[in-house]
Image: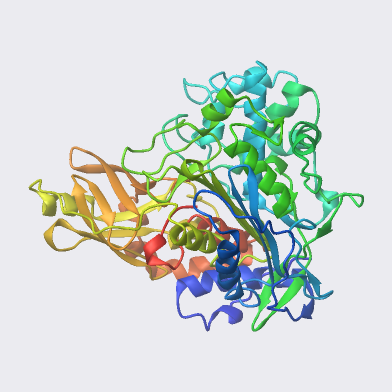
């Protein structure tokens, strides 16, 4: 039984960030069963010691760097982690760190320890969609209802333009956000994908193709369409058409993971002061959106296939033209910020050609990055879900080995009227992928972004969690972060802001908050709202809201504040 956080357990948190993290860890305390100690020792698994190519001329140097980075985190940030770095068609580093299960004191092994990788699994789902496109069974620009004739699922014709698979792969279908991919703590509560999609169908709240709003439902619907087109189950399709051809023998979307599945499952953990607790696992009903379990070695094969124009070791996953199409831009948010490829979003500096995706379940976290210009792929998974996730490690590797240029000092625009533009865009903004109503609305309130003018047309942004950053206008209504890669870009009509795009938020856009919903109005009642929020949530939701939000926010390194 899930236990809810109590107000007493939160009163000693001095910031809203601490409150939210506390809500996460305490909200699932009821899942914990036993205390355990974690070891900070690093366990080496399958590392290719041959010299690499491109950014990694010396594989030993890469391994030594990653060892140092992970040594800072094992036993403190997470009990265990698994890492894969590939260069061109070679796995340069696949290695396990720390403990897979603190109760049993089992070390992580990159080729044997299976992690829940969350939304990184969406990349498998959208690869399956592209296989259907390649075979002529699917089309990215056809109304998805045309593929659902034999299904109980259908998308309502709320607007003139239909929802298409291209919209699903770029999160522009316009579905209302619910965040929760229907997580349950009992495998007996798992339903068929068709049943879940019918029962959990969100409203369409904006026309398709206009704005990004990250949607687990949309990814699950894409997986269901793949299954319908091939007259099989989603799990069965990816097993036979993706995992088996690539030799991903330890990978599955099935829940619970079958007893005869190779490898050992990493246990989920929560932080308990100076140690970690093993907790019970949870299950995701919207399976194509995040139920993938895999080893780092398996994900390495998947990355190599994408970097290899759709093929690896003589096995072709996608035709080269299909792979190129998947990796091309499918939705442009704004010319100055990161956009969406198919399933992948752009990452970091908009000009760096980096593709990424984060993943998180309740007590696991992962991050995948492709650098096609360097033929490099990086994957890191944790068997915990801390506020600083694997993305921070990815960023350190990216910086150390030059996968994108270091931030430069922004040059102030020479166009007059900068102060007036700064005053025009000043205000309070909320994210499109966070709920605007119901008990989860508190997540939106706590995530509001405050924009205010500074001197000489510059901007300052703040959040309720204490994040404060400075920005320089480099062209009208486009602002670059001081000391980082981030960018703000505003769409303005008749001196009114329509949309704010943030480079590090590819999964959504910011929209102006109506006057009656602004924090200086709601702040006086926010404590009451939060108190009711804690009492009304099912156990997972408080944690999920925070982690779904934080996995796409910036990490603590001001020089590398990128997306995901």
Residue 314, quarter of the rendered image: top right
Number of dots carrying numbers: 0
Residue at (69% x, 59% y) in the render: 47
Query: Residue 513 vs residue 425: left or right?
Result: right
Q: Is residue 56 above or below residue 195?
A: below
Task: Answer yes or no: is residue 201 visible.
Answer: no
| Residue 372 visible, this angle | yes
216 in relation to 57, above or below = above
Residue drawn at 75 percent across, 20 percent down:
150
- Residue 475 screen position, x and y as percent: 19, 45
Query: 18 above or below 362?
Result: below
Indicate the quadrant where residue 78 lies.
Answer: bottom right
The residue shown at (56%, 18%) is 142
Q: Would residue 547 appear left or right of 400 to someone viewing this image?
A: right
**Percent position of residue 12, x then y:** 52, 84
How is colour applied across the structure in the image? rainbow
Up the image or down, 189 lies above or below 185; here it is: above
Question: Residue 270: image x %, image y %?
Answer: 68, 71
Q: Nearer the viewer, residue 308 or 412?
A: 308
Instruction: Quarter of the image for the N terminus: give it.
Output: bottom right
């Amino acid at each position: 039984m899930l236990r809810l956080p109590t107000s007493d357990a939160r009163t000693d948190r001095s910031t809203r960030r601490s409150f939210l993290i506390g809500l996460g860890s305490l909200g699932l305390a009821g899942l914990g069963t036993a205390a355990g100690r974690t070891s900070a020792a690093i366990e080496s698994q399958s590392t290719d010691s041959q010299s690499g190519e491109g950014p990694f001329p010396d594989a030993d140097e890469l391994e030594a760097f990653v060892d140092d980075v992970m040594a800072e985190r094992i036993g403190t940030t997470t009990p265990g982690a698994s890492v894969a770095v590939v260069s061109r068609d070679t796995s340069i580093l696949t290695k396990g760190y720390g403990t897979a299960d603190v109760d049993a004191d089992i070390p992580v092994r990159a080729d044997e320890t299976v992690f829940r990788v969350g939304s990184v699994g969406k990349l498998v789902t959208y690869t399956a969609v592209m296989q259907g496109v390649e075979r002529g069974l699917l089309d990215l620009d056809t109304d998805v209802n045309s593929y659902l004739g034999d299904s109980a699922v259908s998308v309502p014709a709320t607007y003139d333009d239909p929802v298409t698979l291209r919209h699903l792969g770029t999160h522009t279908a316009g579905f209302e956000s619910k965040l929760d991919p229907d997580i349950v703590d009992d495998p007996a509560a798992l339903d068929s994908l068709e049943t879940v999609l019918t029962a959990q169908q969100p409203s369409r709240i904006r026309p398709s193709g206009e704005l990004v709003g990250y949607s687990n439902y949309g990814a699950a619907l894409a997986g269901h369409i793949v299954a319908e087109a091939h007259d099989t189950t989603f799990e069965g399709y990816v097993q036979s058409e993706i995992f088996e051809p690539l030799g991903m023998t330890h990978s599955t979307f099935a829940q619970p993971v079958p007893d005869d599945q190779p490898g050992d499952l990493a246990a989920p953990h929560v932080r308990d002061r100076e140690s970690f607790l093993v907790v019970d696992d949870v299950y995701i009903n919207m399976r194509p959106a995040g139920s993938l379990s895999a080893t780092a070695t398996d994900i390495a094969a998947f990355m190599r296939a994408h970097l290899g124009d759709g093929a690896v070791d003589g096995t072709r996953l996608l035709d080269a033209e299909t792979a190129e199409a998947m990796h091309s831009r499918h939705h442009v948010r704004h010319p100055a910020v990161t956009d969406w490829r198919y399933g992948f979003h752009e990452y970091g500096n908009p000009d760096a050609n980096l593709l990424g995706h984060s993943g998180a379940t309740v007590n696991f976290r992962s991050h995948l990055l492709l650098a096609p210009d360097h033929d490099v792929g990086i994957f890191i998974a944790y068997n915990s879900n801390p506020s600083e996730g694997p993305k921070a490690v990815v960023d350190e590797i990216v910086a150390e080995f030059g996968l994108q240029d270091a931030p430069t000092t922004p040059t102030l625009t020479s166009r007059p009227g900068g102060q007036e533009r700064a005053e025009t865009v000043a205000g309070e903004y909320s994210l499109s992928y966070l709920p605007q109503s119901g008990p989860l609305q508190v997540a939106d309130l706590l995530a509001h972004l405050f924009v205010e003018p500074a001197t000489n047309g510059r901007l300052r942004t703040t959040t309720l969690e204490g994040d404060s950053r400075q920005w320089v206008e480099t062209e009208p209504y486009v602002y670059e972060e001081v000391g980082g890669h981030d960018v703000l870009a505003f769409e303005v009509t008749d001196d009114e802001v329509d949309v704010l795009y943030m480079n590090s938020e590819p999964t959504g856009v910011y929209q102006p908050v109506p006057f009656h919903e602004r924090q200086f109005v709601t702040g006086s009642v926010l404590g009451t709202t939060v108190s009711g929020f804690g009492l009304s949530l099912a156990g997972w939701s408080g944690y999920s809201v925070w982690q779904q939000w934080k996995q796409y926010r910036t990490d603590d390194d001001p020089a590398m504040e990128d997306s995901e």
